[in-house]
Image: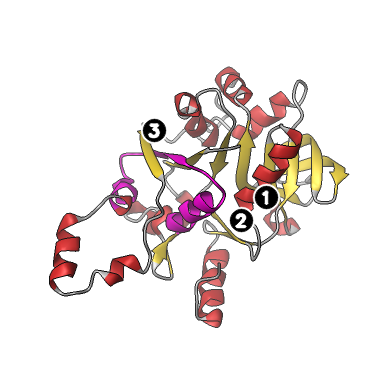
Amino acid sequence: MIKKAIIPAGGFGTRNLPVTKVIPKEMFPVGSKPVIHYLVEELKESGIEDILMVVSSHKNLIVDYFDSSLALEAFLASKNKLHLLREHPIPDIRIHYVRQPYAKGLGDAISFGKQFAGGEPFAVVLPDDLIFSANQPALGQLIEAYTKYQSSVIGLKETKTEDLHHYGVIKGEPVEKGLYRIQDIVEKPKQNPPSHFAAAGRYIFTPDIFNELEALEADSGGEVQVTDAIKASLGACTVYGKLLEGERYDIGLQKDYLKLIYDMLKTEKNPQ
């Protein structure tokens, strides 16, 4: 079973500037909780026991959020208001941190988790994407596919043509309903995307991915792309794409973030 997950949270959040100069996108409020709280809940519900958060020096708010605040707890206790914290408890899960000195892409961030993974398959969950499913959590759906096929699996969502340039897009061969054997993957295609199936911020990798990442050179923008590592592995390994059930919200896109807030207001409750 998959028991470890990496959350890469070291980037500058350039799609959400200027607010991300002071507030990490992972801490954007969604109801009474920040984005990253929902991710950790999803990981807990999917059976994950250990999380490695890859952060940078300007992401101390994330570390503080998951830490205890003795002064706040003492204050609330004195006012008989401790229940306010208990309404949205931090999931009981082990969280570790590592610093990424420079924002050099998703692939670079994942490479910081090699020692953490310890030679085991592991999950990667991107804080840009919230996926709410009425049944099985998004990562749990990937774990189910990995358990059956014992190969790396990428979470996919069918995506509108005008939005495909934001994501890695696959070319795949159907294996069963909702599951594809990936034949190619293109990072942020500007034209002629190979399909409408885009990576949805959920991955399960076998440890081989670290060898592929180490062999890569940075692209023209100075970043190491995990898409390139996946593409390089296709000759030697089978990688699957799993079409995920549930509603996806890309927090990096203002229209998605506002839609999420609107959907919450309509239902008058958290959308999970």
Q: In this view, does 242 lie to the left or right of 64?
A: right
Residue 24 seen in the current view: yes
Mark 3, mark 2: which one is toward the viewer? 2
Mark 1, mark 3: which one is toward the viewer? 1
Circle 1/circle 2 CB separation < 8 Å = yes
Q: Quadrant of residue 96?
A: top left
Nearest to N terminus: mark 3 or mark 2: 3
Question: Residue 268 lies in magenta, yes or no?
Answer: no
Three-letter amino acid code at the position of disc 1: Gln
Secondary structure under the numbered disc 2 in the rendered image? loop
Q: For label 3, count other residues whose C-alpha is less than 10 Å away and answer few (under 14), some (14-19) or many (20+).
A: many
Mark 1 highlights which residue? 141
Q: Is residue 145 left or right of residue 53?
A: right
Relative to 229, does residue 264 appear above or below in the rendering?
below
Using the image as rendered, state which of residue 8 and residue 225 is in the foreground. 8
Q: Magenta stretch?
A: 35-64
Mark 3 highlights which residue? 100
Residue 131: give x, y in percent of width and height.
60, 58
Secondary structure under the numbered disc 3 in the rendered image? loop
Mark 2 highlights which residue? 137
What residue sits 35% from the left and 56% below the top?
23
Nearest to N terminus: mark 1 or mark 3: 3
Residue 166: give x, y in percent of width and height.
63, 50
Q: Is residue 218 left or right of residue 239?
A: left
